[in-house]
Image (cartoon, helix red, strand yellow):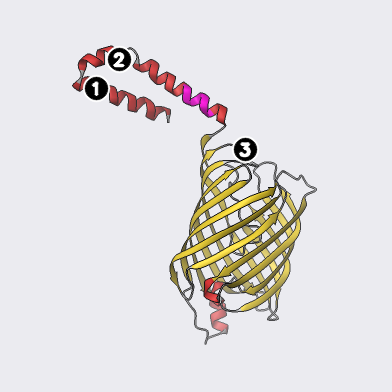
Amino acid sequence: MFRFLRCSTWFAWIFLCAFRPQCCAQTLNHIPTSIESLVTSFENSDTHSGIRLQHMPDGLLYSSYLAGPRESRIGTAVLSSSSGDDVWDTTLGGRVGILRLGTADVFRPEGWQIDIEGAAFPRLNADQNADVDAADFRFGVPLTWRQDDWQAKLAFYHLSSHAGDEFLVRNPLFERINFSRNSLVLGVGHFVTPDWRIYAEADYGFINDGGTEPWWLQFGFDYAPEQPTGLQGAPFVAVNALLREEVDFGGTFTTMLGWSWRSDQNNHLCRLGLQYSDGHTSQFEFHDRNEQLIGVGLWYDF
């Protein structure tokens, strides 16, 4: 930034000298002082406000929903299904900040931030030698904002769903679909207390295939420690509802509860607890099926 200011000023002075040499002589002695004054003013303003440009910052301004069924994180859950099968739902991914214009507070940062996120969501069938029944894949770029107790998100993401090879071998008459969507998301969150957030978002798919329709809605709340917990940890509770137009705005209800640990180094959150889901499956290759799931899981959020 400072180098850009210096270069821009010198180019302006050279241009002025070429067309107005008399002005050039009058301003020559003042330019270096003016540049330094401008840079010093910028530095002082930056220091006092606490706002600065940071690349690859620690922490997120708009954290992922703890009970969201398709949030990018690392996690795994062993679940008993209403169909009689035991399934192993795993999330392999993460979400990190790329660029922030804001404060450097790790635990409660403010400002604007661009993130990058991505994950794979395989489902393994524990009753079939851990065969892969299906897998969803997600990639996205959120632009997020936070000030005081309010936060907002404008994001793009791509989601696609695929049937597993072993599942297709076991079910040769199954007709796979190319369920995929490119979406824009607008989300808003509010911290009722430092540990308790409520949120809602609207998700519009502008490119849809395989039976998905444009509008998805999502809302819920998270209760988890905002500050570092040490080894003793603290309880967490999360509830999420995902409603989808292609199933007449039915969808998936998910609740989680258990124990959590917040890092004192980077604000990462590790959780161990119970999960219960009811409604349409979140494995979107089978998007019109209903299921109930209950079990135990371990999740790690960046």
Q: Earlier in the sequence, mark 2 or mark 3?
A: 2
Q: Which residue is identified by label 3?
A: 105
* Total numbered labels placed on residues in the image: 3
Residue drawn at 59 percent across, 63 percent down:
218
Mark 2 to mark 3 CA distance (whole Å):
42 Å
Asked if residue 164 shows in the view, the reply is no
Q: Which residue is identified by label 1?
A: 16
* Residue 205 on image: x %, y %: 46, 65
* Residue 90 on image: x %, y %: 63, 65
Q: Which residues are magenta?
A: 41-46
- Label 2 SS: helix
Asked whether residue 194 is drawn in magenta, I would say: no
Which three-letter amino acid code belongs to the residue tagged 1?
Leu
* Residue 145 on image: x %, y %: 54, 46
* In front of the other: 251 or 125: 251
Residues at discs 1 and 2 in contact (Cβ within 8 Å): yes
Mark 1 to mark 3 CA distance (whole Å):
44 Å
Which three-letter amino acid code belongs to the residue tagged 3?
Asp
| Other-residue count near label 2 (Cα within 10 Å), few / some / many at <14 / 14–19 / ≥20 | few
* In front of the other: 240 or 262: 240
Q: Earlier in the sequence, mark 1 or mark 3?
A: 1
Asked whether residue 45 is drawn in magenta, I would say: yes
* In front of the other: 240 or 6: 240
Which three-letter amino acid code belongs to the residue tagged 2?
Thr
Residues at discs 1 and 3 in contact (Cβ within 8 Å): no
| Other-residue count near label 3 (Cα within 10 Å), few / some / many at <14 / 14–19 / ≥20 | few
* Residue 110 on image: x %, y %: 58, 41
Q: Which residue is identified by label 2?
A: 27
- Label 1 SS: helix
